[in-house]
Image (cartoon, rainbow, N blue to C red):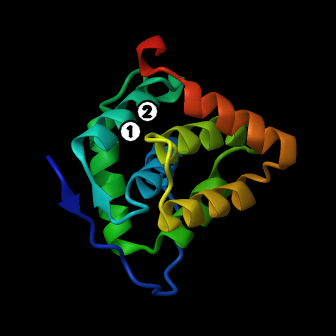
Amino acid sequence: MTGFEQIVVAPATGKKYLPKDIREAYASVLFCCVAADKAVGEEELVLLDHSLLSMAVFSECDEAEYVAIAEENARNYPACEILRGSFNSIRKELWPQLFFHCCQILLRNGVMSDKEKHMLDRVIELSSTEGASVKKIMEIALHWDLKDV
C-alpha cells in the first residue's frame, strides 16, 4: 500500500477473529488504529512500521508481512472484532505497551477525529487501562519523539 488510500472496512458479520500469533495481533490492532478514520497515508504507515519495529517480538521478522495481513484482516473483519480477538490473545501484562502504541498512532497529529476518539475509547475499554494510567500513557505518547526510537 502506498500513498493515501481509502480502506474498505468490513461490516459486522458475526465472524470471530482469532490471530495466528502475537505479531498478527499487535499488527492488526495497530492497523485498526491507523485506519480508524478510514484512510491511511504514508506518514501513518511509517509510524506503524516504527511502532512494530520497536517491539522485541518483531526483531527477527518482516513487519511488512504482518502489516499486509493486518490490512487484509481489516477488509474481512470489523474493527471491534479484531480488537477483541487480539486483546484476548495477548497476555494482559503486555496490554499497557499495546495501549501506548495505539495512543502514539491515534494522537500522531495532536487532534483526534470522532472515529479516532471512538477507537481510543474501545482500546481503553479492552486494555483495562484506567484513569491516571490512561492520562499518563497518553501524555507520554503525545510527546514521544520517533527520533528517540
Q: Residue at x 29, y 60 (%)?
A: 39
- Describe the element under mark 2 as helix, strand or loop: helix
Q: Residue furthest top?
A: 148
Q: Which residue is mark 2?
A: 52
Mark 2–mark 1 CB contact (< 8 Å): yes
Q: Is residue 123 left or right of residue 61?
A: right
Which of the pair 144/87 is nearer the observer?
144
Residue 7 location (% of width, % of height)? 27, 66
At label 2, counting other C-alpha atoms closer than 10 Å, the crowd grade (few under 14, some 14-19, many 20 or more) is many
Q: Is residue 136 left or right of residue 102?
A: right
- Residue type of the residue flagged with mark 2: Leu
Q: Residue at x 47, y 54 (%)?
A: 33
Q: Is residue 61 left or right of residue 23?
A: left
Residue 130 location (% of width, % of height)? 84, 49
Q: CA distance from mark 2 to mark 1?
A: 6 Å
In the rendered image, the vertical position of residue 14 relative to residue 64, given as above or below = below
Q: Residue at x 41, y 26 (%)?
A: 53
In the rendered image, the vertical position of residue 64 relative to residue 83, given as above or below = above
Q: Which residue is mark 1?
A: 48
Please tell me in which quadrant of the rendered image residue 103 appears: top right
Residue 131 location (% of width, % of height)? 85, 48
- Residue type of the residue flagged with mark 1: Leu
